Amino acid sequence: MALLAHQLRTPLSTINALAQGVIRRADRLSTHDIQVKAEKIWRASLRLDELIETILSYSRASAGSIMLNPSEFHPSELIKRVCREQGGQEPGRPFHIDIKDLPEMIVGDPVLLEQALVIVVSNAMKYSRPDQPVDVTARGEDGMIRIIVKDRGIGIPERDLPFILQPFFRGRNAKKLPGTGLGLSLAWYILKLHGGNLEVESRERRGTKVSLIVPETNTTGLSYSI
């Protein structure tokens, strides 16, 4: 709880300080200054929203109350939308998207799968420099689709890799960066509910590759708890 409270306070403190600065200096700020501060407030609010959504989803997952709401959807459209929306938060970051041989439609819970992909893509951005590219590759194989998200960031120390999917665990080289340690465990949980899996490969200072594996059809869901 102390970790979560600290993570929530950080964007709240940013929003509070920037808003007070605008109020105190409103008559002296240029349009450019206001735009810069407004963008910082916007980014801090996005971070706060992401934290709250992750915490709420983790609470539901740990209580076993997340249920699939399966429907047909276009997997390629979901992947492109996530990359477009996440990339919009860092316009200068290169995104390399390579989608081939995906089925036109699959059956699953598109809301939950989008949340899992957002977690993985946002991690790739968070743990790499803004000028470093994020590669997103998707392929269909034997009734499954595999989405691979690769970055060139700080990577995960080898001794931390066996624990990286555990709730609240964070690599020792990531402790000074914002995060709760819940994201990957939640993404893994969502994929397991679909009968899929999440795989992580990484080398410290060389980057991380995360594979999201999803069956083309899942209508019932499986029982897993974090």
Image (tube, rainbow, N blue to C red):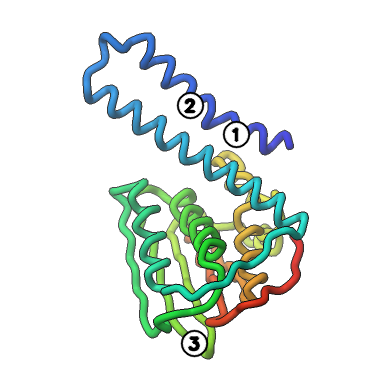
- In the rendered structure, find residue 141 and report the number of the disc placed on it: 3
Horizontal side, residue 146 vs residue 220: left or right:
left
Amino acid type of the residue tagged 1 in the rendering: Leu
Amino acid type of the residue tagged 3 in the rendering: Glu
Horizontal side, residue 62 vs residue 147: left or right:
right
* Mark 1, secondary structure of its residue: helix
Give the distance between the C-alpha atoms of the residues marked 1 and 3, in whole angstroms. Answer: 40 Å
Q: Say if 38 sits above or below 27 in the image.
A: below
The residue beneath circle 1 is 8
Quadrant containing the C terminus is bottom right
Task: Give the crowd class for mark 2: few <14, some 14-19, many >=20 residues within 10 Å.
Answer: some
Amino acid type of the residue tagged 2 in the rendering: Thr
Horizontal side, residue 152 vs residue 204: left or right:
left
The residue beneath circle 2 is 14
Q: For residue 156, which quarter of the picture? A: bottom right
**Mark 3 or 2 closer to N-term?**
2
* Percent coordinates x, y for residue 80 in the rendering: 36, 65
* Mark 3, secondary structure of its residue: strand
Q: Residue at x 66, y 59 (%)?
A: 185
* Percent coordinates x, y for residue 108 in the rendering: 55, 73
* Mark 2, secondary structure of its residue: helix
* Percent coordinates x, y for residue 33 in the rendering: 27, 22
Q: Residue at x 33, y 65 (%)?
A: 96
Q: For residue 21, which quarter of the picture? A: top left
